[in-house]
Amino acid sequence: MGNEKASDLLNSAPPGQLLGAVVPPPMPLAPFATLVSASRGRFYRETESATRTCYSRDRDRVIHSSAFRRLKHKTQVFVQHEGDYYRTRLTHSLEVAQLARSLARSLKVDEDLAETVALAHDLGHTPFGHAGEDALAAVTKDIGGFDHNAHALRLLTRLEHRYAEFDGLNLTWETLEGLVKHNGPILAPVPGPIAGFDARWPLELQSWPGMEAQIAALADDIAYVNHDLDDGLRAGLFTIAALKDAPLAGPHAAAVTARFGELELSRFIGEMIRTLMSALLDDLRAETQARLAAAKPDSAAAVRRHAGPLVALSPAMLEQLRALKAFLFTHMYQHPRVIASMTRAKAVVTDLFKAFCADPQLLPPDWARQCGPGTTGGVVRDYIAGMTDTYALAEYARIFRTTIEL
């Protein structure tokens, strides 16, 4: 049976409830959790696993995807050759998933779903971090631009080719909704890939997502601030003395020195991150419990209908966190070393896009066959977005017969 016929057969009925046995989660959940038994199912009908919940099955599909493996060689802040200690998109995603799962457990919501959204939240990122995304968005502005969240949805519903009977990973509605809306409702203008999928299977874009996706979003914030402090100190972009004057992190840094005196850098970082992360997580739990007590949601649908997020940091902590992000922006993301590297990275992405559009035969054959009038730019955009840092540099060397050092 060919792909097209199989997909038509699978989609002969509208997407809906899960087929087969519904495996319960390993612990009783709160009524406002996203319950497996109430899942809206998958776009293409499949018989569910007898041993895994639908959300744990989604998690496993994400982990086994090629897009997830490629995160190993995608920049978080530092490009790979700068050192093995620094985070990549993959290690960042694993840290976010660990925090999300722990938070979900303590709040009695579905751990597997929270973990899945956390693992998938950065799948759509380009090579070279935000610099690569900015460059790809600029060079494609006439064909709709680029949005990493929208591209993640496209990867999971179209570009991953693991199954004979459908494109994408055929994840549950709740996972896709959580991925698209983990940072909150999506209002106009809606990125093209999200709008296109929403027309096929509405994701209720104007509402908040379930608790699990909200948890993943805050876990992302907490993880990246803490590990960027770690990486920034190890890279020498700022000193311990400078950090002691930083908002939020400063008192934790000072407390470590006051308690232990001079420490080797790795021990100092470990002690400071431990107390800072605990303070953020404790605040998040307390604020979220207070909001739940006030709102009294009795279902995941009630969470989505709520006027604002139910998973949140307290206003005071949120203000401190924003101030710390401003410190990192000045001392790390805008550091001359990082800026110089990312400027060269933008040039790589821009030049590759122009070269492939000018001559689509430079693309691998399966990509080149998709090109034609009105489609070439979009094909090239997808191809570049999927590249790792190392592959982008290799393609640059192949096409331009020169290497570029970041």
Image (tube, grey):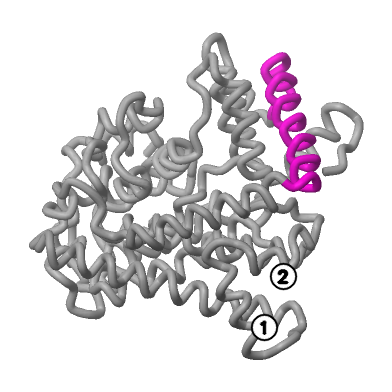
Q: Quadrant of the C terminus?
A: top right
Residue 401 position in % (x across, y down) = 90, 30
- What's the magenta region? 335-363
Q: Which residue is mark 2?
A: 240
Q: Is residue 143 magenta?
A: no
Q: In the figure, 90 relative to 124: above or below?
A: below
Residue 257 badge? 1
Q: Does the segment drawn in magenta span residue 353?
A: yes
Above or below, comparing residue 55 to residue 190 in the picture: below
> Which structural element holds mark 2?
helix
Is mark 1 in CB contact (under 8 Å) with mark 2?
Answer: yes
Residue found farthest to the right: 402
Mark 2 residue type: Ile
Residue ID at (13%, 52%): 301
User: Could you tell me the amino acid type at mark 1?
Assistant: Thr
Specify the label residue 281 is tagged with: none
Q: Is residue 192 left or right of residue 394?
A: left
- Whether residue 256 is visible to the viewer of this picture, yes or no, is yes
Quadrant of residue 100 within the rendered picture: bottom left
Residue 392 image point, x, y percent? 73, 39
Q: Relative to residue 60, is residue 29 drawn left or right?
A: left
Q: Nearer the viewer, residue 275 or 219?
A: 275
Quadrant position of residue 288: bottom left
- Residue at 37% in and 61% down: 316
The quarter in which the N terminus is drawn is: top left
Q: Main secondary structure of the magenta part?
A: helix
Residue 162 position within the rendered picture, expressed as x and y whole percent measured from the top left: 47, 49
